[in-house]
Image (cartoon, rainbow, N blue to C red):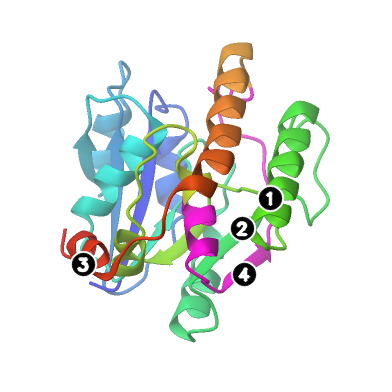
Amino acid sequence: MELSIIIPAYNEAGSIAAVLEEIPVLPNSEVIVVDGGSTDDTTVIAREHGAKVLVEPRRGYGQACAVGVDAAAGEVCIFLDADGADNPSYIPQLLRLLRSETADLVLCSRLTAELDPGVMPWHQRAGNQLAAMLINQLYGCSLTDLSPMRAVVRKKLAALGMQEMTYGWPTEMIVRAAKANWQIIEVPVIYRARYAGRSKISGTLRGTILAAYYILSTIFRSLRIADQDPSQQEMHSDR
């Protein structure tokens, strides 16, 4: 298996069908939807559209991503959200960059392209810019965004020893990759309005505060984490 597309989902029955239908048909690939205990028909719809569905009772965005990685068979993992804001048409481009070995981690940047009004609330944009600025200053990167849509080689990701099971998971991936001297590349993408409902993060005060806390705490806490030694890296790679 060459590619595993991992989609964390929670109560996304209004959008998951359209997201899965938009994913390009690629050889040797699989789509894994990790459901965080939805109370709607998200899992039923995902299965009907050919996705492998995993139900993860433990809450947390990072928890869902980690479960997807553990179940993945692909050499490359690509992550995207289930709300339709991430455009799956960029998947072949992300895959090509990893195939050519010009990047270890490919991130989609929503902030290097013009955004339609209301697509990304001001506080979400400002929070991403602040987090990117801190990562650039503390870890020597040159990022513009912390977009959830990204591509990485699965065994390399396993070797990072990811620990953060919350909204801070994408941030931890970036800072651990930077500490490991990975080549990180950004790809400008057009960010869309979600297909249905409101964001569970930027659409609520509680979600916004929690996301900000987990992202910022991950940035500063990771400065104190020692790099993985070779035996630990090998252990995580064999999971």
Q: CA distance from mark 3 to mark 4?
A: 28 Å
Give, as a single range, the part of the protein colored magenta: 173-202
Write down the residue under mark 1: 145
Q: Amino acid at mark 2?
A: Cys
Relative image position of residue 155 (x, y in whole percent):
29, 68
Residue at point 44% right, 82% down?
Answer: 99
Disc 1 versus disc 2: nearer the observer: 1
Residue at point 62% right, 21% down?
Answer: 208
Crowd around label 1: few <14 · some 14–19 · many ≥20 (10 Å): many
Marks 1,2: beta carbons within 8 A: yes
Q: Secondary structure at mark 1?
A: loop
Q: Secondary structure at mark 3?
A: helix
Crowd around label 4: few <14 · some 14–19 · many ≥20 (10 Å): many
Write down the residue under mark 4: 185
Residue at point 27% right, 22% down?
Answer: 37
Write down the residue under mark 3: 231
Relative image position of residue 195 (x, y in whole percent):
57, 33
Question: Does the magenta segment cover residue 67?
Answer: no
Which mark sits nearer the N-terminus, 3 or 2? Answer: 2
Marks 3,2: beta carbons within 8 A: no
Out of 92 and 235, give the one closest to the viewer: 235
Out of 201 and 231, give the one closest to the viewer: 231
- Residue 84 visible somewhere in the drawing: no
Q: Amino acid at mark 3?
A: Ser
